[in-house]
């Protein structure tokens, strides 16, 4: 097994978004005879990564793609044809052409990887069309959109899976295994977030996707074309799910537990302005803009079962990447920064253990089984697992591991944090998106070894 030859730190670091050439996956072929027919809405960098991983599977056929950028359509079409598959049906004549993709009978499932403001609208339309829907993060921007996802799922019976890949990160899944085996004891406190220097994602020169200039909006390409506008206009944690998704799984949110309330505060916002001045000069038009988003946004969530969760959004200042995980219980804790664990009665008193041995000992069954296939799939391997869970769930037409209620609860952090910050840290109550059913819903079996 590859994991025995490498440290978990290296395995769980950010990897290239591109997929390497691997043998075709044959997973689940005994469960269904027909290939799952998948359509892709959005084939930018993220959508193309999903496409590359889909093309490695024997149980999937990509039948349609949609994007308003002709260059991305050309690239995606070439990947499909070069893979030996039939040329897909193509959509993208205008922003609403995705609806024609959803009308196709030979699309059973869709993956939506478009700019954030389209996520909920497209997911609603996909569920109404009866498609098994995979939605990139974050799933919703407003509280109304969060409810739209839940209401549409309940009205149509169509399933939605939020494609949160960090739930499948190797160290995170090993710690989840430890949580399920009660190694940390009764859970008390968590920390997580999105701490990632995104300045070269939020600005570019209009020619390359990362850096090279200080443009955004219409003068930029890729994520800078749309993502940076959120930092200009919103003072909120606009990207909470990478951190909170794995924590929600550990403490069974929406399944015997739920988020009750949060408070949020924001620091001043100087990082993006300083970047513009440094790389474009103080006379650049963008240097005159006032970015509303604070550089460090701190949210504290309380749960029905009494745990607290600190969620940090820190993307506008220079810093190394970290999701800042901490999982703490009555018997010990794990902290990703420092790669350390302490378990009372096992560790030397008042001394940290290096986490690697613990994480290898409790390596998740999914990683033990599929680790060699996962490597090279993108983001340290976790892209394989999230896509595998989506495909297998869609083939079986079952409730996915991360469903519409999760998409709503996790994404609700954005509008609630915005309200709390605007009201000087005033507590904000989470809606109960399950309408009381969280009390009787059983936790998802995250310890399965198939998907």
Image: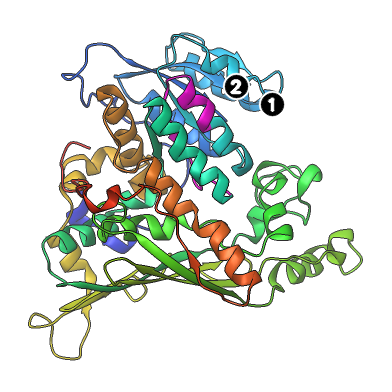
The spot of residue 400 in percent (x, y) is 30, 36
Say above or below: 327 vs 229: below
Q: Which residue is disc 2 drawn over? A: 98
Magenta-colored stretch includes residue 127: yes
Which residue is depicted at the point 89% across and 62% down?
Answer: 284
Q: In this figure, what is the number of numbered marks?
A: 2
Splitting the image into 4 quarters, where does residue 175 fall? Answer: bottom left
Q: Which mark, residue 95?
A: 1
Say above or below: 195 vs 408: below
Is residue 63 found left or right of 363 in the rendered image? right
Which residue is depicted at the point 34% across and 33% down?
Answer: 390
Question: Mark 1 and mark 2 in contact (Cβ < 8 Å)?
Answer: yes
For the C terminus, which image quadrant?
Answer: top left
Say above or below: 129 vs 417: above
Colour setting:
rainbow
Q: Residue furthest bottom?
A: 350
The spot of residue 294 in percent (x, y) is 65, 71
Q: Which mark, residue 402?
A: none
Disc 2 from disc 1: Cα separation: 7 Å
Is residue 211 found left or right of 56 in the rendered image? right
Residue interval drawn in magenta: 123-141
Q: Residue furthest front?
A: 436
The spot of residue 153 in percent (x, y) is 41, 33
Which residue is depicted at the point 15% across and 78% down?
Answer: 331
Magenta-colored stretch includes residue 52: no
SS class of the residue under badge 1?
loop
Splitting the image into 4 quarters, where does residue 212 fall? Answer: bottom right
The spot of residue 28 in percent (x, y) is 20, 24
| Residue closest to the eye, 86 or 68 | 68
């Amino acid at each position: 097994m590859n994991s025995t030859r490498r440290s978990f730190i290296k395995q769980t670091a950010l990897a290239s978004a591109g997929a390497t050439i691997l043998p075709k996956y044959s997973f689940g072929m005994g469960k269904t005879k027909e290939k799952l027919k998948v359509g892709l809405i959005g084939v930018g960098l993220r959508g193309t990564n999903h496409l590359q991983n889909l093309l490695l599977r024997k149980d999937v056929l990509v039948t349609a793609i949609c994007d308003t950028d002709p260059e991305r359509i050309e690239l995606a079409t070439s990947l499909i044809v070069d893979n030996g598959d039939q040329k897909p049906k193509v959509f993208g004549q205008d922003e609403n052409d995705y609806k024609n993709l959803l009308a196709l009978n030979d699309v059973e499932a869709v993956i939506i990887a478009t700019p954030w403001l389209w996520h909920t609208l497209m997911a609603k339309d996909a569920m109404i069309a009866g498609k098994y829907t995979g939605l990139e993060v974050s799933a919703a921007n407003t509280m109304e959109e969060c409810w739209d996802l839940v209401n549409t799922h309940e009205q149509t019976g169509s399933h939605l899976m939020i494609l949160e890949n960090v739930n499948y990160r190797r160290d995170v899944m090993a710690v989840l295994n430890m949580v399920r085996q009660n190694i940390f004891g009764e859970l008390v406190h968590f920390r997580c977030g999105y701490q990632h220097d995104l300045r070269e994602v939020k600005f570019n020169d209009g020619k390359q996707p990362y850096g090279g200039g200080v443009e955004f909006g219409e003068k930029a390409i890729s994520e800078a074309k749309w993502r940076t506008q959120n930092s200009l206009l919103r003072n909120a944690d606009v990207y909470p799910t990478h951190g909170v998704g794995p924590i929600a799984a550990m403490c069974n949110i929406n399944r015997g537990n739920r988020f009750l309330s949060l408070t949020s505060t924001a620091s001043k916002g100087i990082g993006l302005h300083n970047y513009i001045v440094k790389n474009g000069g103080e006379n650049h038009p963008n240097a005159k803009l006032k970015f509303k988003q604070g550089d460090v946004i701190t949210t504290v969530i309380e749960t029905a079962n009494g745990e607290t969760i600190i969620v940090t959004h820190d993307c506008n200042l220079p810093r190394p990447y970290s999701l800042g995980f901490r999982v703490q219980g009555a018997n010990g804790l794990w902290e990703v920064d420092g790669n350390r664990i302490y378990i009372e009665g096992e560790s030397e008193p008042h001394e940290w253990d290096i986490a690697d041995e613990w994480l290898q000992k409790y390596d998740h069954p999914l990683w033990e089984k599929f680790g060699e296939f996962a490597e090279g799939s993108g983001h340290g391997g976790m892209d394989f697992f999230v896509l595998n869970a989506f495909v297998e769930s869609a083939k079986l037409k079952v409730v996915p591991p991360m469903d519409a209620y999760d998409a709503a609860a996790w994404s609700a952090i954005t509008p609630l944090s915005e309200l709390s910050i605007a009201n000087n840290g005033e507590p904000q109550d989470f809606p109960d998106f399950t309408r009381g059913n969280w009390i009787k819903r059983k936790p998802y079996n995250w310890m399965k070894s198939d998907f």
